[in-house]
Amino acid sequence: MIELSRRTLLQGTGAAFMTAAFGGAVKAAPKRGGNLRIGIAGGTSGDSLDPTSTPVDAGFLTLNTMRSTLVGMNAKGEPTPLLAESWEPSNDLTKWYFNIRKGATFHSGKSVTADDVVASLNLHRGDKTTSPAKALLDPVTNVEADGPNRVVITLNRANIEFVSLFKTDFLVILPSKDGVIDRASKDGTGPYALESFEPGQHLSFKRNPNYWDLDNYGFFDSAEVVVIADPAARMNALRSGRVDLVNSVDLKTAAMLKRVAGLKLENIPSGLYYGMPMLVDVAPFNDNNVRMALKYAIKRQEIVDKVLLGHGTVGNDQPIFKNVKFAATDLPQREYDPDKARHYLKQAGYDSIDLPLNVAEIGFPGATAVSQLFAASAKAAGINLNVTREPDDGYFERVWMKQPFTTAYWHQAVTADSRFTEAFLPGAAWNETHFNNPRFNELAVKARETVDENTRAGMYHEMQRIIYDEGGLLNPVFANYVWAMKDNVHRPDDVTTLGDLDSFQCISRWWMA
């Protein structure tokens, strides 16, 4: 049993229980009005409104525009109230009580109730779900309503980090009927209602006049989103005036955009990482010596310089960026070393080796160029990479986690625990490397029930070291978010970097002037 005073908790993860959901200085007073048109990079014909299957940018933008989670997160990484106006744990951290915001409604006019929350969270629980959030909720043993506006969540063990998990985009609240959720429902609780949805092509939104916090959200009258996968076409759409805002700027033309009258470019450091995951249970990647050989066979700085054109930093084969709490910034930076790569290859029993690498630009922008540079540098270590360029459409369904060596991007972690849980624990739907390390698994459980932050930090640092030493993740770079927009589009100063475009809240929080 863990004894925890209210004061201790408020000094820790819960310090922002009753803070404003949207705060910080802004560049200019927000104005209401206008129609925002966005050209977005990520979207496929397989996109859906189902919150249990949303792997690309268009889906994340939709979740953050038309729907809401119980909890938000500010730029300092502190949880903030959204549909839950407050919460508190039991003294032993095995029960959490969420008070649902009175007066919050769905776009249909239906009031948000505890029953909707229970049914929405249960979508991601149970043996049959394929939700990427399933692993986050695995410690949950029961979710129940305690009256119309209160939800009680019971855990199998204490978890001091639990509240932060509810910022996860997938855990949005949908309306229930007789305890059942329609996953394809266009109804939501967000500051905008969905008007039209063409998967992989086009979405449109209009302001929700009944949103509970229109003082801080919902400044545009409406918004349109068009999926433009090709970087050059996306830039042309902005220059021609077809759209007002684009993400994932073509870095080769970024400098030129700065000189275009009426446009502005922004370059935001972030924990977005471009990864090359290996399935650690598939030969020859099941030999850590092969994985280590690959990690020493790549020129990370060359990728930052030649592909990101300086818009990023080198990665170090573990997923937690330096601005995330408990980041292990003391791990030695892995450098290109073909002799060391050859050493590990020999330890695996090879003088040389041929390996497949299946890539797509939707895996991350520049994935093909990165893979070609990697193939060139790996040759000096006796590693022959056979790079196959896959079609973008359906890549995450057909190739990622199916082929043994691929490319994939991950937005910045909500917390260290959430990233470890959703991407590195056995049973996680998006455990893209099939990682299963007993010590790592043990630490994941212990860290959640450890109140002392210094002790918890040591555990999270050890977990990052395990991934660094033994994991199947090769992440050569962390990429900045680079977006461009017309100069009449404005944003708050306190943008967050849990996802592109202010954690995909650009429609919800930005404005025109």
Image: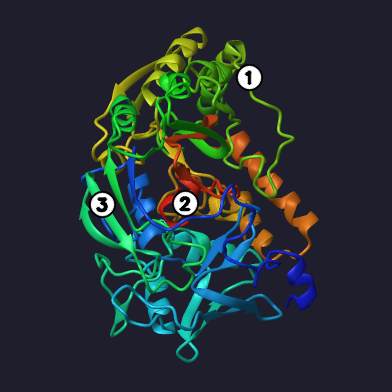
User: At label 3, which amino acid type do we have?
Assistant: Leu
Please indicate whether residue 456 sits to the left or right of residue 376 in the image.
right
Q: Residue at x 43, y 78 (%)?
A: 104
Q: Which residue is mark 3?
A: 203
User: Residue 274, position in %: x, y?
Assistant: 48, 33
Residue 403 badge: none
Which label's residue is closer to the chain start, 2 or 3?
3
Which residue occupies the foreground of this view, 88 or 250? 250
In-image side of 107 versus 13 (left or right): left
User: Looking at the image, which is closer to me, 355 or 365?
Assistant: 365
Residue 80 in the image: state x and y as whole percent. 59, 65
Dot 1 or dot 3, earlier in sequence: 3
Type of amino acid at the residue the image marks with label 1: Glu
Q: Which residue is mark 2?
A: 510
How many numbered marks have been drawn onto this rendered protein structure? 3
Q: CA distance from mark 2 to mark 1?
A: 40 Å
Q: Which residue is mark 1?
A: 335
Crowd around label 2: few <14 · some 14–19 · many ≥20 (10 Å): many
- Residue at the top extreme, as displayed: 380
- Label 2 or label 3, whichever lies nearer to me, is 2
To which quarter of the image does residue 448 belong? bottom right
Q: Is residue 365 above or below residue 160?
A: above
The first of marks 2 and 1 along the sequence is 1
Q: Secondary structure at mark 3?
A: strand
Density class for disc 3 (Cα within 10 Å; few <14, some 14-19, many ≥20) is: some
Q: Position of residue 387 (x, y in %)?
A: 34, 20
Pick the quarter of the image with the N terminus: bottom right
Distance from disc 2 to disc 3, alpha carbons, whole Å, reads 18 Å
Please determine whether, in this image, residue 462 is positioned above or below residue 357: below
C-beta proximity under 8 Å, tags 2 and 1? no
Query: 46 or 197: nearer the eye?
Result: 197
